Image: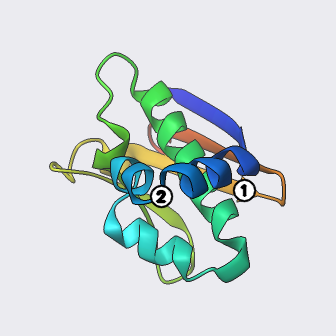
C-alpha cells in the first residue's frame, strides 16, 4: 500500500499562528514539536513535512487509520525519518516506510507499507 500527500507550508504556518497550541497539540507529539521548533525560521517547513507524512500514512493504512496525533514521526541518528504509531508502536512500524521533502512553499511525503529490498 502507498500513500502520498502534499501541502502548502503557508497553510500549516497560518494554522499554527491562528490556533497555536490547540492545533499543535491536536496534531503533533511533544517530541515532534520540540524537533520542529529547533529548526528556527524553517520550522514551518518541518511541521508541514510531518503533517504531510501523517496524511500519507493514513492513506496507506486505509480503512483503519489512527488519529494524526497517534502517528509520531522522528528521525534516526542519520536523519532518516521513521514512524511510531502510539499507543501501539508495533502497529505496522517494521513495514512502514516514509520519505519527506520540503522547500519554502511546499512539503510532500510518501508512505509505503511493505518490505524493502531486492528479490
The CA span between labels 2 and 1 is 24 Å
Q: Residue at x 49, y 26 (%)?
A: 59
| Pointer 2 or 1: first along the chain | 2
* Label 1: which secondary element: strand
Q: Is residue 78 left or right of residue 25?
A: right
Where residue 41 appears, as percent x and y from the top left, is 72, 77
What residue is shown at x 43% (from left), y 31% (from top)?
58
Residue tagged 1: 101
* Residue 119, position as x, y percentages in the image: 55, 42
**Is 83 left, or right, of 1 in this rendering?**
left
Residue found at the very far right of the displayed protein = 104
Q: Would you call the spot at circle 2 few (<14 residues within 10 Å), some (14-19), or many (20 or more)? A: few
Q: Is residue 113 visible?
A: no
Task: Check residue 74 in the rendering and tell me which mark sits there, or answer none.
Answer: none
Residue at 36% x, 71% y: name it.
31
Res 79 seen here: yes
CB contact under 8 Å: marks 2 and 1 = no
Query: Which residue is rendered at x = 48% and y = 83% of the image?
Result: 77
- Disc 2 target residue: 20
Amino acid at each position: 500500500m502507498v500513500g502520498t500527500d502534499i501541502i502548502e507550508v503557508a497553510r500549516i504556518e497560518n494554522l499554527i499562528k491562528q490556533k497555536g497550541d490547540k492545533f499543535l497539540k491536536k496534531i503533533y507529539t511533544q517530541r515532534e514539536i520540540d524537533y520542529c521548533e529547533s529548526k528556527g525560521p524553517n520550522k514551518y517547513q518541518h511541521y508541514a513535512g510531518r503533517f504531510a507524512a501523517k496524511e500519507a500514512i493514513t492513506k496507506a493504512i486505509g480503512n483503519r487509520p489512527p488519529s494524526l496525533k497517534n502517528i509520531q514521526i522522528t528521525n534516526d541518528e542519520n536523519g532518516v525519518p521513521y514512524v511510531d504509531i502510539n499507543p501501539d508502536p508495533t502497529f505496522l512500524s517494521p513495514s512502514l516506510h516514509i520519505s519527506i521533502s520540503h522547500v519554502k512553499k511546499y512539503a510532500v511525503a510518501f508512505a509505503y507499507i511493505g518490505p524493502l529490498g531486492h528479490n
